[in-house]
Amino acid sequence: MPHVIPYQGSKRLLAPAILAVLRERLAGQPVRRLYEPFAGSAAMTLAAAHAQRADQHVVADSYGPIVLLWRQIVEAPQLVAEGYRRVWQAGDYDAVRQAFRRDPTPEDLLYLLTRCVKAAVRFNRRGEFNQAADKRRRGTHPDRMAALIAAAAELLRGRTEFRIGDALETTCDATAGDVAYLDPPWHGTTVGNDNRYHAGYTRAQLLTLIDALHSRGVLVLLSYDGKRAGQDFAQMLPDSLRRLDLPAMRSAQATLLGRAEWTTESLYVTDTLRQ
Ligand SMILES: C[S@@+](CC[C@H](N)C(=O)[O-])C[C@H]1O[C@@H](n2cnc3c(N)ncnc32)[C@H](O)[C@@H]1O
């Protein structure tokens, strides 16, 4: 699987388990469009495209630069690979961060994400990308990055649409036969001090989104909470969703990105679907 964009909260390792749940839930029914409205590194889209699970894909996020990066990866893979090589070879993280604040180009965002602390998009009060470089990360070698970009482009070309906006808008044309995989910023990163994404997402917003999707017969898969060391972070969600506990995946990358503490991750799946 071409894991192109390192991204805090990526579902790369969990995606195969989520896909297995989807396969069982659908019992052989095809998926017309798979929507990933909180796409980030689009781990589920890549896994589903690789498994030929859906005819069409919609990759969306309210953080515009990540969507523009995805569009460029798929529509102009060589351009973004060459741009990445240029900034990687120059190797000046601070200069790239400055340039990105003035003009957020796809190759600069890709480089910043491969080099920054926890692969996390963080902002200062003025809304400028603010994350520092992680001295342990050199950034994916450009040859390897070019191969990953080419493989991802091959998987998604001709069957993927890219949208920037709030999840409620970017999924507004989803209907019966479509599936939405939701991975919103977790509640704990929306309230309190840990505002790690460019925007939080409240429980009320999530309930409205689930309701809208269910009212149009869209099957929902939702990653929302998990358990760690005896604590359960179960959230109040509607009865229309059934909760499954998936074993959380560990990797050296996950440890580096600060995600190693989870023991299970919850997946909520639409129980009965209105036809
Ligand atoms: C947990 S991350 C998703 C990670 C993704 N599943 C992956 O594999 O990389 C949450 C994403 O939601 C985006 N986001 C925040 N608020 C949003 C909103 N209202 N609508 C759409 N996307 C939003 C953030 O920019 C971030 O990329």
Image: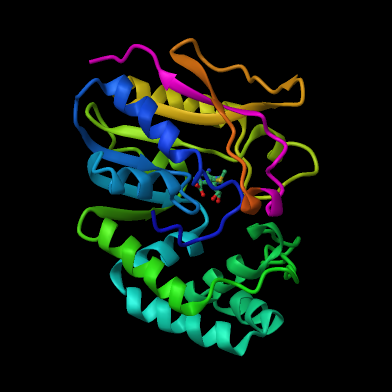
Residue 153, horizontal then vertical, whole percent: 30, 64
Residue 40 forms part of the magenta stretch: no
Residue at the image point whose x is 63% and y is 75% from the top: 101
Q: 25 or 229: nearer the eye?
A: 229
Report the side of 265 relative to 70 (left or right): right
205 over 272 or under it: above or below: below
Q: 68 or 244: nearer the eye?
A: 244
Residue 266 forms part of the magenta stretch: yes
Res 28 quadrant in image? top left
Residue 169, horizontal then vertical, whole percent: 40, 42
Report the side of 24 relative to 137 (left or right): left
The quadrant of the rendering that contains the C terminus is top left
- Considering every residue shown, the one lying at the far right of the view is 193
Residue at the image point whose x is 49% and y is 46% from the top: 12
Residue at the image point whose x is 72% and y is 65% from the top: 131
Can I make out residue 217 in this image? no
185 over 156 or under it: above or below: above
For the record, the magenta segment spans: 255-275
Report the side of 44 relative to 255 (left or right): left
Residue at the image point whose x is 50% and y is 61% from the top: 5
Q: 89 or 195: nearer the eye?
A: 89
Res 6 quadrant in image? bottom right
